Amino acid sequence: MLRRAKPLFHKLLGSAILMGMLGHQAVADEVERWQVNMTPGVTPVSQEIYGLHMLIFWICVAISVIVFGALAYTIYAHRRSKNREPSTFHEHLGLEIFWTAIPFLILVVMAIPATRSLIHMYDTDTEVDLDVVVTGYQWKWQYEYLGKEVSFFSNLHEDSNAARQLGSGVDVNTIPNYLLEVDRPLVVPVKQKIRFLVTANDVIHAWWVPALGIKRDAIPGFVRESWAYIEEPGIYRGVCAELCGRDHGFMPIVVQAVEQAEFNEWIAQEQAAAAELRELAAQTFTFEDLYERGEGVYNRSCAACHGAQGQGVPGAFPAIAGSAVATGPLEAHLDVVLNGVPGTAMQAFGAQLSPVDIAAVVTFQRNAFGNNMGDQVQPVDVVQQQNQ
Ligand SMILES: [Cu+2]
């Protein structure tokens, strides 16, 4: 026990103290595992927050040294065996003023840089290069690049998602970035001012990426702004930081910062893919194609509530296996999926999934888990019902 505890203690102490004294870079790699201090992050704002944090930390250290030093000194120097006579004065005006003024001054000294950092953090209006709308859903994020016609959902990566299931038998230590990986990261350019417009579609979430110095509540009906100027390419991870329901812990955030040229290439690819998807919606698919695609959509977008085997969660989420809706009239089934069930956790997927994916997942639900309806939905049917 002791043999393990000692290096751990040294590391904790070492990281806390060294991080402040030597600057962060020297020890940043070493202390990753037992990191206790804040990390400086990769944006001017996050580094400012870090600097502020260290400044306040050292002010607190100085105050502690003085206060506890004085205490220790007086306990020792004025101990009883020395027969010191205690002072007997009461209500010393000078002393009262002194010990009110000193903390007041300390607070003012701390408030000046703190206010300066806050103003910098909230400066979301000047010279914005790229706007990204970030929308929280139970339990995923949607990213929309304003004016670029690129928008997608970012879900927990399927490896993490499979491993987290009860009885999956998977050792989560074998999953890289367990619960911190997504299927599609948010790709952004470096050295650009990116403004994040953060909101939510159902309940309150919070978009938190420590390396960017951003933690913004995502509130339905409100758009809250934040920004980042990322200096180095890299992958920066975060999580939803608001208790937003059962799968709150399973909606991670991955931001991938790339060079501008790479970003331009990526966004062009995304735009081409979106155009392709619009074309696909006009095509007719075979039953097998729909079913196979639908299974993927189901696992990504529906299984969290309706269960990997369509079994649902009794009392909360209805089963799809044997569901009256999934084995009833097609239009009504499509209607539930397109428009959701207002006032329940069943969202309107018409806004989230492409017509191809909607057609596929409805076809899948009608024919999987023992629902042998034998019918199918084509993307054109979805578009038609959507336009009614
Ligand atoms: Cu959330």
Image (cartoon, rainbow, N blue to C red):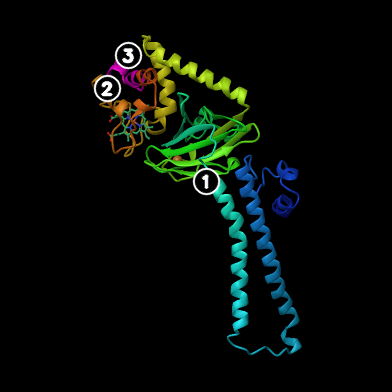
Q: Quadrant of residue 139?
A: top left
Question: Is residue 3 shown above or below 366?
Answer: below
Q: Quick check: is 382 in the magenta stretch? A: yes
- What amino acid is labelled 3 in the image? Val
Residues at marks 1 and 2, CA–CA distance in whole angstroms: 52 Å
Residues at marks 3 and 2, CA–CA distance in whole angstroms: 21 Å
Image location of residue 58, percent across then percent down: 68, 59
Question: Is residue 226 shown above or below 269?
Answer: below
Residue of label 2: 327
In contact (CB < 8 Å): disc 3 and disc 2: no
Comparing labels 3 and 2, the label whose residue is closer to the camera:
3
Q: Quadrant of residue 170?
A: top right
Residue under the point 56% across and 33% down: 255
Dividing the image into four quarters, tell me where ligand 1 lies: top left
Q: Secondary structure at mark 2?
A: loop
Residue of label 3: 380
Q: Secondary structure at mark 3?
A: helix
Locate residue 168 relative to residue 176 in the image: left or right.
left
